Amino acid sequence: MSTTRLLLLGVVRIFQPAYGYQLRRELLTWNVQQWANINPGSIYTGLRTLAKHGFLEELAEGKGSKPGRTSYQLTEDGETEYFSLLRQALWTVDGFNPGQMQAALSFLWSLERDEVVAALESRIVQLEQHEKAAPFHERQVEQDPGTPNHVVEMFRITTARDRGELEWTQSFRARVLSGEYAFAGEKPDWLPSPDAAEKWRNLPES
């Protein structure tokens, strides 16, 4: 699953139509370069690639707009791809890719509450299964004389992440069930400020 692709499609979907530098600045405020391993310079390339594959539409320059600017919005295929990637990230536990769930968290509001609860319950089951199997697999890894030390520690840190994520997922599920946050079909609990789009348009590109 491409975390980068989900983030790019998701942030375009929030601000569309939006300019490339606007999207780049927004993603950098999310610190994606740290937890999603996204090179800031690759964001423009990623947008162009998504447009090339038909997931984004590059819009023509409007009257009075600055030269060289390209704005983007999702195509119908892009909307389908966005939801496919979001659901894949939400329903699939991947201890070696923790950024996947962090990306999904950014866009959970675009799914209905019942689906989010069902996905969290599925994640709980998956994480509980991982926790039950961890001691057996850890013994196998430790007892194999051919296993490098760093692999042993990689296994241990992944197991620790799974354990911590299980605790968080259980508490998050309880909050969602209690009515916290807003999801698709509900009254939004957060909206961009009315002048946000204009503010981004007027910022100098760097």
Image (cartoon, rainbow, N blue to C red):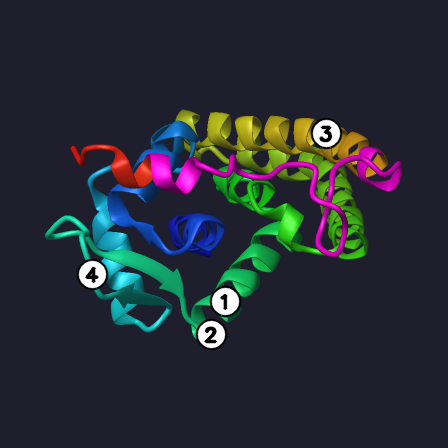
First in residue order: circle 2 vs circle 3: 2
Crowdedness of circle 2 by 10 Å Cα count: few (<14), some, many (20+)?
Answer: few
> How far across and down, in percent of the image, does residue 69 sit?
18, 52
Asked whether disc 4 touches disc 1, contact meaning CB atoms under 8 Å apart, the reply is: no
Asked whether disc 2 touches disc 3, contact meaning CB atoms under 8 Å apart, the reply is: no
Q: Secondary structure at mark 1?
A: helix
Q: Which residues are magenta?
A: 175-199
Crowdedness of circle 4 by 10 Å Cα count: few (<14), some, many (20+)?
Answer: few
- Residue at the disc numbered 2: 76
- Under mark 3, the amino acid is Trp
- Residue at the disc numbered 1: 79
Asked whether disc 2 touches disc 4, contact meaning CB atoms under 8 Å apart, the reply is: no
- Residue at the disc numbered 4: 61
What is the magenta segment's predominant secondary structure? loop
- Under mark 1, the amino acid is Glu
- Residue at the disc numbered 3: 168
Decide if residue 37 is in sight here. Answer: no
Q: Secondary structure at mark 3?
A: helix
Crowdedness of circle 3 by 10 Å Cα count: few (<14), some, many (20+)?
Answer: few
First in residue order: circle 2 vs circle 4: 4
